[in-house]
Image (spheres, rainbow, N blue to C red):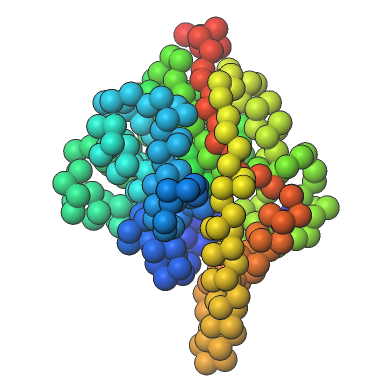
């Protein structure tokens, strides 16, 4: 199984940002996730906003809450929480470019007091114990490499009875990633080695004192985004091959299209699901 360093992950996001700006309408959506479609969703940016809305509702995020945006990307979720719930947010990412982009957007939106962004790993953060009311993680848990370290750090930085909100792809059942070449072809171009199953996630959370409160499977509601990514990948494959006839594309840029093709094939096979989770710390788990 391939392993990816923090620098690899930062390189992926920085080298492929141009693809997301082109195909994921990054300037408007301010996010890279699949998003969630319903009968009222008319565009991909709407779907991304809808995902933020659903996760916020699932977690019952209160006004003025202190929220950690773990794996914040270019800051879309932080801005949503600040604008819709008057939350105070800190976003963390491994990419300095994403920090710079998110900070610039915060200036444009007049949210520099509400939304801060720093470069660090969400498994080792410079915050004091019991700083946040909730942590918010959209499509970044797979980059952890050590999910136990993620939950241990969430236990440290969350206040008593703090909440963990997660929206991500999860294996539809527990299986070794080495046994599924197509899943590896989906994940590796995203600088992801493996992902958890639902049961594995719940088990890890419980081991660190967090109880599953609620969950929402929206696998069928991301289908339009799966298809959109597949189309972008097919066109991108042609563009990449032409580009490489004259120039040398960056490491992740040249293979990015492979993930877009593989994610549709694995989605149709039922190898993974897209699920929202709410965990809450159990008071008995905290000792001083």
* Quarter of the image where one finds residue 234: bottom right
The x, y position of residue 133, in whole percent, is 38, 23
Where 244 sits versus 169, above or below?
below
Q: Residue at x 66, y 61 (%)?
A: 264
Please state which of residues 248 and 106 is positioned toward the viewer in this rendering: 106
Q: Residue furthest bottom?
A: 246
| Quadrant location, the N terminus | bottom right
Relative to residue 108, is residue 259 drawn left or right? right
Q: Is residue 142 visible?
A: no
Q: Residue at x 62, y 45 (%)?
A: 219
Q: Residue at x 39, y 52 (%)?
A: 46
Q: Residue at x 25, y 54 (%)?
A: 105
Q: Residue furthest front?
A: 39
Where 194 sits versus 81, above or below?
below
The x, y position of residue 116, in whole percent, is 27, 41
Relative to residue 217, is residue 78 drawn left or right? left
Relative to residue 204, is residue 14 drawn left or right? left
Relative to residue 167, is residue 53 drawn left or right? left
The x, y position of residue 62, in whole percent, is 33, 24
Query: Tag count in the figure?
Result: 0
Please state which of residues 183 and 158 is positioned toward the viewer in this rendering: 183
Q: Is residue 267 visible?
A: yes
Q: Residue furthest left?
A: 110
Q: Residue furthest right?
A: 179
The x, y position of residue 282, in whole percent, is 53, 13
* Quarter of the image where one finds residue 80: top left
Where 17 sits versus 176, above or below?
below
């Amino acid at each position: 199984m391939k392993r990816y360093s923090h620098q690899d992950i930062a390189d992926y996001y920085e080298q492929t940002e141009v693809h997301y700006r082109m195909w994921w309408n990054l300037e408007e959506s301010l996010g890279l996730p699949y998003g969630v479609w319903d009968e009222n969703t008319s565009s991909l940016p709407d779907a991304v906003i809808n995902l933020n809305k659903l996760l916020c509702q699932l977690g019952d995020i209160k006004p003025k809450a202190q929220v950690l945006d773990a794996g914040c990307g270019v800051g879309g979720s932080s801005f949503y929480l600040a604008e819709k719930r008057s939350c105070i947010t800190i976003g963390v990412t491994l990419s300095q470019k994403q920090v710079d982009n998110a900070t610039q957007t915060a200036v444009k939106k007049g949210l520099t007091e509400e939304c801060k962004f720093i470069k660090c790993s969400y498994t080792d953060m410079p915050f004091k114990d019991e700083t946040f009311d909730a942590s918010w993680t959209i499509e970044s848990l797979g980059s952890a490499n050590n999910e136990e370290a993620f939950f241990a750090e969430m236990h440290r930085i969350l206040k008593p009875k703090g909440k963990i909100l997660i929206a991500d792809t999860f294996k539809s059942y527990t299986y070794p990633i080495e046994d599924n070449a197509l899943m590896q072809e989906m994940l590796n171009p995203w600088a992801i080695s493996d992902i958890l199953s639902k049961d594995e996630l719940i088990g890890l959370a419980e081991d660190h004192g967090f109880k599953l409160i609620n969950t929402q499977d929206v696998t069928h509601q991301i289908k339009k985004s799966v298809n959109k990514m597949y189309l972008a990948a097919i066109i991108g494959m042609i563009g990449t091959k032409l580009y490489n006839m004259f120039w040398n594309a960056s490491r992740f840029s040249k293979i990015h299209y492979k993930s877009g093709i593989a994610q549709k094939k694995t989605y149709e096979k039922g190898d993974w699901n897209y699920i929202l989770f709410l965990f809450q710390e159990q008071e008995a788990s905290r000792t001083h």
